[in-house]
Amino acid sequence: MSTEEAVQVAEADGRDFVTEEDVQSVESTTDRPEWLPEKYNTGEDLAKAYKELESKLGTKEEDIRNSIIEEIQNEAFSERPETVGDYEIPESINSEEASDNELFQWWANHSFENGFSQAEFEQGIQMYADAISQNEPDIEAETQKLGDNANTRIEAASMFAHKIFSEEQIPAIERLFESAEGVMVMETIMEKMKDSSFAADAQATSGVSEKQLREMMNDPRYWKDRDPLFIKEVTEGFQQIYK
């Protein structure tokens, strides 16, 4: 079939002979699929070219993706300090204590890894401080609950506590004095013990009893006139009993 077509090609050229080139030309035309572009000789050439193009496109997409990620990171970290150690410690925080505080160091590392700015870093610290302060007692308010002679009552209760409790127990006892109710509890203990041998020893040592001192605290010179000498006498009386 290819030979007949080659003869036709030769006759079309005005020749009465057929060359090898005519035969090859016919065979090439006959074997070539209609869908194959002219610039490719075989389907394998087309498949190879497609794979090369696919590889180039894939590489380009990856470069674009990496470029976008890098741009996003640069934007997100634009206000972050150069190193984690460049975060400035707020004036409200003791810098020496912060350097050894594991929680503070964790927050600094967390802030750096997430690209937090100095303002965001300080905001986190302030939020933590506010949360802690909510659980702390209002010492001023608790003191006001004890009345005008609050300081004397607190001092007397504190001296009493140091008199009867061990050093290991004192930290727990001192937490009682963070509230007015705690001071009153200690005063109740003091009252219950006034008739004990402890109270007897205290009276013998000071020459004045706790009951007498409390009566003196009800004297107008103590709570109304605020007589300095009279107040001093009451204070020293308690100091003698619970020193």
Image (cartoon, rainbow, N blue to C red):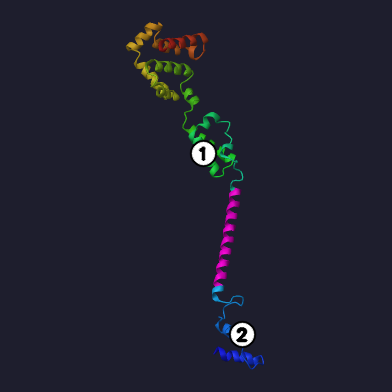
Type of amino acid at the residue the image marks with label 2: Glu
Residue sitting at the far left:
196
Q: CA distance from mark 1 to mark 2?
A: 82 Å
Q: Which residue position holds label 2?
A: 21
For the record, the magenta segment spans 46-75
Query: Residue 229 at what x, y percent from top left?
Result: 51, 8
Q: Nearer the viewer, residue 156 or 168?
A: 168
User: Which residue is painted at 40% across and 11% down in the image?
Assistant: 210
Type of amino acid at the residue the image marks with label 1: Trp
Query: Residue 144 at what x, y percent from top left?
Result: 49, 23
Specify whether residue 74 is painted magenta: yes
Whether residues under marks 1 and 2 lie with C-beta atoms below 8 angstroms apart, the answer is: no
Query: Residue 122 at what x, y percent from top left?
Result: 56, 37
**Quadrant holding the C terminus:** top left
Q: Nearer the viewer, residue 80 or 176?
A: 80
Looking at the image, is mark 1 or mark 2 earlier in the sequence?
2
Residue 107 numbered mark, or none: 1
